[in-house]
Amino acid sequence: MPDVRTDMNVISKSVILVVDDDALVRVHSNLALEDAGYEVVEASNAADALVKLEERPDIAALFTDVRMPGDLNGIDLANAVHAQRPDIAILVTSGTDNGKMALPAAARFIRKPYTGAQLSKLLQR
C-alpha cells in the first residue's frame, strides 16, 4: 500500500479524494492514481467533496482543481479541509494560476497539464 507523505509525517492510508468539475480530467487523474495503487473517491465540486470527507474518514489526500462551480473554489476547499483535517495531504492544480495562492503551508501545487507519473510522484512524497 503506497504512503502519502506530508512534510515528515507519513499517512498510511491510500484513499485520495479527486475534485474536478471536468469529468475527463477526473477520469485521467483517477486512472493514474489507481494505476499507482491508490483508491480514488470522486467529487465534482467543493460542496460534494466536503460531504465525501464526512462520509469517508479514511481519505488521506485531496487532489483538487482551483476553478470549480459553486460557492467554494479549490483554494477555499484546500483551506477548509486543512482546517478540519490537517492530517490530509493536499495537492492543488490549475492551468491558469501560477501556484502563488493562499494555500495551506503544507499543500503542494501542480500546474496543468500534468502527467499521471508527475501526479503519482507528488503524492508519494
Image (cartoon, rainbow, N blue to C red):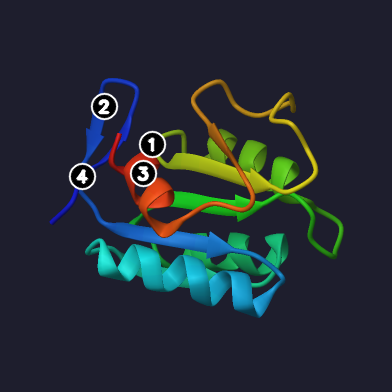
Instruction: Answer with mark 4 or mark 3, whichever residue precedes in sequence.
Output: 4
Say whether disc 2 or disc 4 marks the residue closer to the N-terminus. Answer: 4
Q: Given contact means CB atoms under 8 Å apart, are the residues at marks 1 and 2 in contact?
A: yes
| Mark 2 nearby-residue class (10 Å; few <14, some 14–19, many ≥20) | few
Reading the image, the residue beneath label 4 is 3
Q: Which of the 4 image quarters holds residue 83?
A: top right
* Mark 4 and mark 3 residues within 8 Å of each other at the beta carbon: no
Determine the secondary structure under disc 1: loop
Camera-nearest label, 4 or 1 = 4
Three-letter amino acid code at disc 4? Answer: Asp
Along the polypeptide, which appears first: circle 1 or circle 2? 2
In primary-sequence order, the first of circles 4 and 1 is 4
Residue 55 shows in the view: no
Picture coordinates of residue 58, whole percent (x, y): 32, 59
Instruction: Name the residue beneath numbered marker 2.
Output: 9
Looking at the rendered image, the quarter that the C terminus falls into is top left
Q: Position of residue 121 (x, y in %)?
A: 33, 43
Answer few, some or many: residues within 10 Å of disc 1's Cα (few below 14, many 20 plus, some between 14 and 19): some
Tell me how far mark 4 sits from mark 1, CA to CA: 13 Å
Q: Position of residue 96 (x, y in %)?
A: 80, 44
Foreground mark, 1 or 3, reads 3
The residue carrying mark 1 is 87
Q: As shown in the figure, which amino acid type bears the numbered disc 2? A: Asn
- Where does label 3 land, which residue? 123
Q: Secondary structure at mark 3?
A: helix
* Distance CA(mark 3)–CA(mark 2): 13 Å
Q: Disc 1 residue type? A: Asp
Q: Earlier in the sequence, mark 1 or mark 3?
A: 1
